[in-house]
Amino acid sequence: MAEKINLLAFEKPLTELFKKIEHLKKISEISMTDEILMLKKRIETMRKEIFLNLTPIQVVQVARHIMRPTMLDYINLVFTDFVELHGDRNFSDDPAMVGGIAKLNGKSVVVIGHQKGHATKELISRNFGMANPEGYRKALRLMRIAARFNKPIISFVDTPGAYPGIGAEERGQAEAIAKNLREMIALTVPFVTVITGEGGSGGALGIGMGNKVLMLEFSIYSVISPEGCASILFRDAGRAPEAAEKSKLVAKNLLELGIIDEIIKEPIGGAHNNCEQAAQNIKAAVIKHIDELKKLSHGELISHRYQKYRKMGIFTEV
């Protein structure tokens, strides 16, 4: 019944079908096989219809789903021979930011990303994917290693934002992110960013200035959460659905605005319903873009990245 337990509020129409399947399984493991298959097909059809018409605030719920694949899930499914590298050589090792060397399609790459978790204990130990300054400094250390040895960089973004605690501010949170932004723009290696869940504020940008920015279909990318936006603009966090609509934080809006470069298709019901398929879709997209970027010289890679971010925010009045 794990699947039923993890249904989101807007998936409630599926609840009764899952109950029927569990009931049929208890009655007989053999005689009801056809009925169970029919119910599963019906669930798949209904789920497809539901997910074709999600509102922005519903996409936010999917992006935050407790069983949504994490950075380490994708590490195991997309890459091989992963060796994690720890610490920022300055203060400590930040468990909210994971990185190291791995192989993608048999070729060495550097992988960096936010790590959340699936259970309360892991979420707490990983600080809910909210990195401290030492996390961003660790990420920068790994980026410099990639540049030194001419290895492509792949970053996985999934954070509500950088950690806003007093200790983080005392250790230079804003400076750490700003320094990453300055150095990422000048990296001489192919750099692909994948937004897998929440792409929140400067916490996302701190590892997200790729030559190509890809986004899973039901992930979000925004300067602020819908709840935070509603609290500031409307003085009412309950207007989060309206804020989500106006923020244009879903993948299709961001592709239209030129903020991202590609939407990676998710399995029916979201990545958490078929981690393996989601990982294969990510792998294919990342390999495609890395292969394209490898054709560019060091100077062209820098220029490509610079022009990409320079043109954001340009508009024409008619």
Image (cartoon, grey):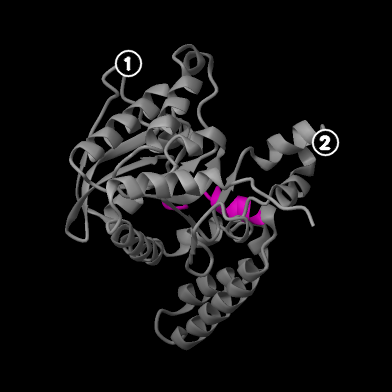
Left or right of 279? Residue 229 is: right
Within the magenta stretch, is there residue 60?
yes
95 relative to 37, above or below: above
Left or right of 235? Residue 137 is: left
- Kind of residue indicated by mark 1: Phe
Would residue 187 be seen by someone viewing this image from the given angle?
yes
Residue sitting nearer the eye, 208 or 281: 208
Residue beneath the point at 53% across and 43% down: 310
- In the drawing, what numbered circle is on residue 91? 1
Between marks 2 and 1, how big is the CA–CA gap?
39 Å
Left or right of 168? Residue 92 is: left
Image location (x, y in percent) of residue 39? 55, 80
Circle 2 residue = 234
Within the magenta stretch, is there residue 232?
no
Label 2 with label 1: CB-CB less than 8 Å: no
Bounds of the magenta segment: 58-69
Residue sitting nearer the eye, 117 or 277: 277
Residue beneath the point at 34% across and 53% down: 74
Numbered disc 1: secondary structure: loop
Would residue 132 be seen by someone viewing this image from the given angle?
no
Q: Quadrant of residue 179?
A: top left
Numbered disc 2: secondary structure: loop
258 relative to 231, above or below: below
Image location (x, y in percent) of residue 312? 58, 47
Image location (x, y in percent) of residue 311? 56, 47
Residue beneath the point at 51% across and 26% down: 163
| Disc 1: CA contacts within 10 A as few (<14), some (14-19) or many (>=20) | few
- Kind of residue indicated by mark 2: Phe
